[in-house]
Image: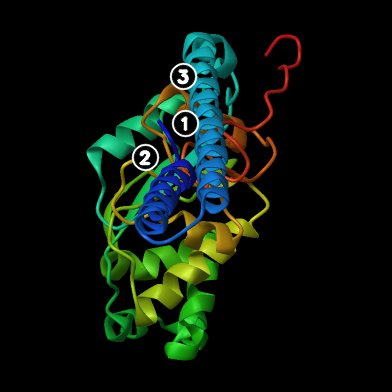
Amino acid sequence: MFDLRYHVASLAAVFVALLIGILVGVGMSGKVDDAEKKQLKSDVSRLNAQLDAAGARRATKAREQEAGREVVKNAYPLLIADRLRGDRIAILFAGAVDAGLRGDVERTLSDAGSGAPARMRALKLPIDATQVDSALNGELRSYRGDAEIDDLGRKLAGGDTPAWDALSTKLVEEKAGSFRRSVDGVVVVRTVKPQEGKTAQFLAGIYDGLADSGVPAVGVEISDVRESAVPVWSDAGLSTVDDVEGPAGRLALALLLSGSASGNYGLKASASDGIVPPIEQLPAGG
């Protein structure tokens, strides 16, 4: 699959070729001498050669990408085995639970030896700021108000049990597991459209808090998602995987959760760090 950069390059090449053709046609129909005609023909030949070379490079790049994905697919069971053995991983849905995406993440954890998620929370979005404020009492009163909504998100990202308990009925649509024990990594999935206003501030606080939590935090999505959350997650400091539905994406997620080099991985132009992170050999004994 070509990424967006190569589609754009292809379209640009077509438009350039059409433009040259039009100019040449006009030139040939006018009063130009033989030398000018010869120069125009030479220019067209040169540009055609450049376009052919660009096409060959795109084809080669596509074959390299496909070969890389095939290698990962074939080696996937060996590469992912035991990467997360003993680790406790949480899943946070920004929006309702998506069964398909949840299955992709849980398969990753299972294949990597972690087992079932330690906990899962799905947030009701957009938030009702008035109801949230009404639930913030006692020591949590300081988080009331629009100016504090991002700080509230950071507090929740840190796994603060009293805050989650106080806000569960206002913010949580579906849940599993508890906050009694810490986790070794967090997977973030967005199932709603990009948010605005207070909800956007709240989510930004959560993403920032997860990025600063000291454990790997990874935003994941499928390759054909309509509106990518990768730019938002990346700006907040989260690592990202844009093709979690495939073996390469699941391997990338497991590697990131295990502490591999952070970054943006996958198949799209936004995957600036490659298809998967560097694969390090596991210590003897897993």
Label 2 belongs to which residue?
223
SS assignment at label 1: helix
SS assignment at label 3: helix
User: In this orientation, which residue lies closer to the viewer: 242 or 97?
Assistant: 242
SS assignment at label 2: loop
The image quadrant of residue 275 is: top right
Residue at position x 49%, y 65% from top?
A: 206
Task: Using the rendered image of the protein, determine whether residue 160 is visible from the camera's viewpoint.
Answer: no
x%, y% of residue 181? 54, 45
Q: Quadrant of the C terminus?
A: top right
- The first of marks 2 and 1 along the sequence is 2
User: In this orientation, which residue lies closer to the viewer: 44 or 157?
Assistant: 44
Q: CA distance from mark 1 to mark 3?
A: 13 Å
Label 1 belongs to which residue?
249
Image check: 108 left or right of 264?
Answer: left
Q: Are marks 2 and 1 in contact (CB under 8 Å)?
A: yes
Q: Which amino acid is tagged 1?
A: Gly
- The first of marks 1 and 3 along the sequence is 3
Q: Quadrant of the N terminus?
A: top left
- The first of marks 2 and 3 along the sequence is 3
Q: CA distance from mark 2 to mark 3?
A: 20 Å
Image check: 248 left or right of 212?
Answer: left
Q: Nearer the viewer, mark 2 or mark 1?
A: 2
Residue at position x 32%, y 37% from top?
A: 102
